[in-house]
Amino acid sequence: MQKKDDFVVTPWEVAGDVDYDRLVEKFGTQHITPEQEKHIEKKAGAKHFLLSRKIFFSQRDLQAWIAQAEKGDKVALYTGRGPSGSTHLGHLVPWLFTKYLQDAFGCNLYFQMTDDEKFLFKDGLTRRQSHELAMENALDLIALGFDHKKTKIIIDTDAIKPLYPLALEVSKRVTLSTAKAVFGFTDQNNIGEIFFTSVQSAPAFLPSEELRNETGNAKANVPVLIPCAIDQDPHWRITRDVADKLGYPKPSAIHCKFMPSLKGAGKMSASDPDSSIYTTDSPEKAEKKVMRAFTGGRATIEEQRKLGGNPDICSVCQYLKFFFEPDDKKLAQRFEDYRNGNILDGENKAYLAEKVKDFLKEHQRKREQARKVVDKFLYAP
Ligand code: TYM
C-alpha cells in the first residue's frame, strides 16, 4: 500500500513533519548530486555550508544551467518574495544562497516582489499594505550586499508591464483542472488566485525576452536558475510545462529545506510571531524568542547530562545549522557535545542568542542604509 503523507507542502501552506525524500519523489525533482555540488563550489572558489549540509538538496535541470554558464552563454538567476509581513530569517536562506550563486556565476538576478499575490491570498491585507511591505522587504534583500547593477527588483503592481504579456501567454496554456491538480484550488478560491501562477512564471522568461528585444534575435535565450525553498516548486512545474510551447528555455531550479519554527517541527508560521525571528525584531526581543525556543533537551538537567539531547529536533541547534554557525567543524563539535549532554539548553540558547543579536544589529544597520539606494534596484521597464 502507498504510504500516506502526513505533511502538506504548497506555496501557501507548509504543515506537518516534512519528509524531503518523499517530496522529491512526489514533486518529481532530483537530489543535488555530489558532482553538481563540486561544480558549483569550483566556480565559486569556496564551499557554501547551505550546500555541503544538504540544506539546498533538490534541483531541476541544474546541470543544464551550469553547462550554459560554463560555455560563456548568458544565464540569469530568478527568485522572489511574497510581501505579506516582515522578512524572517528563513526567507534570507535562499537569498543568501542566491548571492553566493550570483557571485560565482556573475549573472543578473531578477527578484520578484509579488505584492499582487499577497493581496489576493491574504485576508485583510490591502493593496497599499502589501506594496509597502514589498518596499520594506526589499531593504532586507539589499542589506545582504547585492549589487544594483546586477540585481533588479520587480514589484508586480509597479512593473507588471513587461510581465503581463508573458503571463497572458502562460495563462492561455494552463487549464483550471491543471491549476486545481497542482495547487489544490477549490471552487472557493478567487479567480485572481487561480491566474496568479502565470504572473510568477513570467520572470522566468523575462531575461530571454529582454535579450530578444535588445538584439532583434527572436531565438535568443537566457536560461534562468531559481533558488528557493521547495514550497515554490509547483509554480515551476507549470512554468516548465509551458516553456517549450512558448519557445523559451525551461527554467532550472535549486531547492532548499525549511528553516524550522522556533516552536519545533514545521515551517515558521506568520500567525505565530514567536515561531520565527524577523529582521525587524529588536535584538532584545529576538533574544527572548531564542530563550523560549523548543529544544531537543530532557525534562531535567540531570537527565540531559546523563542521556544527552537531540540536536536534530532542537530548533536552537537547527538555527545554528541553517544560519548562525557557518564553520562545519564547530557545528559538528557542538552537535556532538549536545548529544553527549556536555552542552545544556541554557548555554546553547545563550550561545545562539549572542549570534542572533550580533547579526540583527549589523543587518538593521545595513537595512537602514539600503533606504538610500532602494530606487536603484527597482525594475523600470
Ligand atoms: P515567500 O515570501 O513565501 O518566501 C520567500 C522565499 O523564502 C523561501 N522560504 C523559506 N526558506 C527557508 N526556510 C523557510 N522557513 C522559508 N520560508 C519561506 C520561499 O521558498 C521563497 O524562496 N510566491 C513567492 C514569491 C516569489 C518567488 C519567486 C519565490 C515570486 N517569484 C521566485 C521564489 C522564487 C512567495 O510568496 O515567497
Image (cartoon, helix red, strand yellow):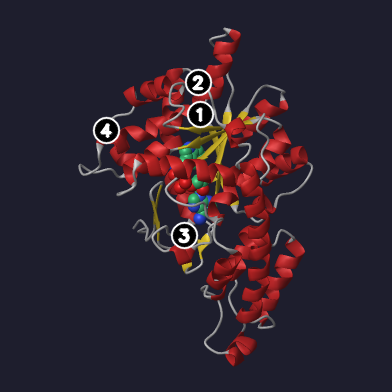
Q: Disc 3 to disc 1, how far (Cα)?
A: 27 Å
Tell me the amino acid under the disc marked 2.
Answer: Tyr
Q: Answer with mark 3 or mark 1, whichever residue precedes in sequence.
A: 1
Are the residues at dot 3 and dot 1 in contact (C-beta closer than 8 Å)? Answer: no
Q: Answer with mark 4 or mark 2, whichever residue precedes in sequence.
A: 4
Q: Which mark is residue 176?
A: 4
Whether label 4 lies within 8 Å of ligand 1 gets the answer no
Q: Residue at x 45, y 62 (%)?
A: 266
Secondary structure at badge 3 equals loop
Q: Answer with mark 3 or mark 4, whichever residue precedes in sequence.
A: 4
User: Which residue is tagged 1?
Assistant: 204
User: Which residue is tagged 3?
Assistant: 268
Q: Is residue 98 visible?
A: yes
Q: Residue at x 63, y 36 (%)?
A: 373
In the picture, the quarter occupied by the N terminus is bottom left
* Disc 1 packing (10 Å; few <14; some 14–19; many ≥20): many
For residue 321, which quarter of the picture?
bottom right
* Disc 2 packing (10 Å; few <14; some 14–19; many ≥20): many
The number of callouts visible is 4
Q: Disc 4 to disc 2, how far (Cα)?
A: 23 Å
Residue found at the far left of this picture: 187
Q: Disc 3 to disc 2, how far (Cα)?
A: 35 Å
Are the residues at dot 2 and dot 1 in contact (C-beta closer than 8 Å)? Answer: yes
